[in-house]
Amino acid sequence: MAPDIGRRLRRGATSGAVVAAAVAALAASQAPEAIQPTTDNAGGDRAVGTGEGTPPSGEGSATGDSPYYTELPPLNTPPKQPGVPGTGTGPLVVTGPAEAGIPATVLSAYKRAEQSVRSTAPGCNLPWQLLAGIGKVESGQASGGRVDANGTTFRPILGPALNGVGFANISDTDDGAYDGDRVHDRAVGPMQFIPSTWATWGQDANGDGKKDPNNIYDAAQAAGLYLCANDRNLALKADLDRAILSYNRSTEYLNTVLSWFEYYKRGTHQVPDGTGVLPVDRSDNRRPGGLPGTTTPTPSVPVSPSPTSPAPKPGSQDPKPGTPGTTKPPTVPTEPAPVPKPPVTSPADKVAALAVAGNRQLTAITDSDFTGVPRAAALDASGKPVAKVNVRFEIVGATDTRFAGGKSAVTATTTSSGIASSPALRAGEKAGTFTIRATVVGRTLGAAEFAVSVTERQADTLVRVGEDPLSAATGTAFAQELQVKATDKGALAPGVLVTAEIVASKTDPKPAAEGPTFKDASRTATFTIGTNGTFTLEKGGLLAGDKAGAYLLKLTAPGGGVLFVELKVTESDSTPDPDPTQEPSEPGTPEASPSPSASPSPSSSPSPSATAPTASPSATVSKA
């Protein structure tokens, strides 16, 4: 059945919100299982399908063919109400036969159910008078309207145990949760749903968070959806008959409901809760002769009987077709009963969808405020805004971005236009993407999601302030200060993260393997541009290392800014150490270098040059 319902809703829905609400309400819906006709006809009723085989697929019984009230409406049909013919939506009728009176809360529930079903399934053409006809036959309009302010019966309305004796045989399906019977199921509530059917079709129409078959608002809306199943159009006689027979497969049941349906279409009036006419005869409680008994209707305003015409005894009347009944409409008008207030529901209960209303995508740079904030719209089933709904905005993902006050989740309330906006949003120091998720507090509706991205601060230009060359000898530190200015599109770019690397050439992106380093002995570092758009590498911030040569300090920034600064490392100056084997000379005495010829030879005579110095006072010893 679910695909058929989906097709009908898609044809009839007029907006995405309506479709969403209808799908949510009926997503888990399936047709109730078909129940075989009872084989015991002790009640005198004839089950539709008896001797005719199994009912068509999908046409089960909402009540398990439980017993029902058999009284028929009086022959003195109430006058039609002004307004649209046959709709019963004209001005309130405050006089008329008692049988035409419907308890105020029960009448309100039927009309609300009609409006709800027509908004989601307009092609079904559900009339509230049909619900009233079924409610009359099933429970006497919730036992004459004995319900509390929220529409719940003062006592559960239970049918007999469906044990196969005169009715269907249905073993317990709810562990007694609804009907208090753990052996067999019983029909429950003013619309007499059996637990297995209620498990599929149950509704929470009064917004109290419960699907209660003993609540007339919940039961009436569930009955409306059930009658509209299988793509029925209740404006067609064949579909109308099938819908009623799906409730209780009995020809007498069909005729009884149709009689009350036509009667209520001629006109109704509301009566105070608890004062409705109570039916007596039921299909499982026949009077002698096998015929249902009759009761004398009690008018809503007492009428003094004529002294010469005593009141007829119950069951003694046999009015001819076309002649008025013995009970005449009262001639004394009554005061209109107060219109009951509908059950109190919170604004969140009215929401059918939460949609993105603005700023679906948000972007900011690190450590700055976002220019916009997430905005979500709360809509009801007809697409109208819902005010005073609490909406929770939550940051989801790895980020240090926060709402005002450093919060990662906040709650805002929708305005009269149905819009909720989060507080101001500030990006942290971490770049990346994440999500902000908006949900209705206390509901499980789909979330409205916003895509958020935080990008790094950028600079498209880096320039050096000053032209002093940077040089140092091996084994020392650079004594010059380095200052760099960052701009982006001509404006100062504070907060930009600059990466510094010592490289051997402009064409080799890898850090140099030798040469200068930063103080921590690494050749890579990061610096943040200050609020004035510059950063300064102080004196001594670079060490020359022990390898002389020409190197480059490469500076890069997000946004394309690049700067190369030359670094020159020279060999340190060296002074030769004195020769430890040489004795110091006396002052004024020339230093002589021994020569092999200075030693006398025993075979030669001394010459005059043998005693002259062989080195000048300016001679030095150099290291090879």
Image: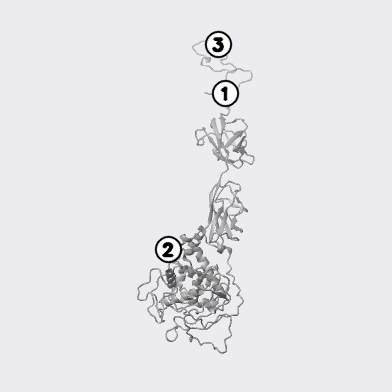
Crowding around mark 1 (Cα neighbors within 10 Å: few <14, some 14 to 19, many 20+) is few
Residue at position x 57%, y 13% from top? 612
Q: Amino acid at mark 3?
A: Ser
Q: Amino acid at mark 2?
A: Asp
Marks 3/1: CA distance?
25 Å
- Helix, strand or loop at disc 2? helix
Examine the image and state in which quarter residue 36 appears: bottom left
- Helix, strand or loop at disc 3? helix
- Expressed as whole percent of the image width and height from the top left, the position of residue 380 reads 55, 61
Label placed on residue 4:
2
Examine the image and state in which quarter residue 91 appears: bottom right
Residue at position x 46%, y 60% from top? 11
Q: The N terminus is located in which quarter?
A: bottom left
Crowding around mark 3 (Cα neighbors within 10 Å: few <14, some 14 to 19, many 20+) is few
Label placed on residue 609:
3
Residue underneath mark 1: 582
Crowding around mark 2 (Cα neighbors within 10 Å: few <14, some 14 to 19, many 20+) is few
Q: Nearer the viewer, residue 183 or 154?
A: 154
Q: Amino acid at mark 1?
A: Gln
Marks 2/1: CA distance?
117 Å
Q: Is residue 148 left or right of residue 242?
A: right
Residue at position x 56%, y 10% from top? 608
Of badges 3 and 2, the one in the foreground is 2
Q: Nearer the viewer, residue 134 or 483?
A: 134
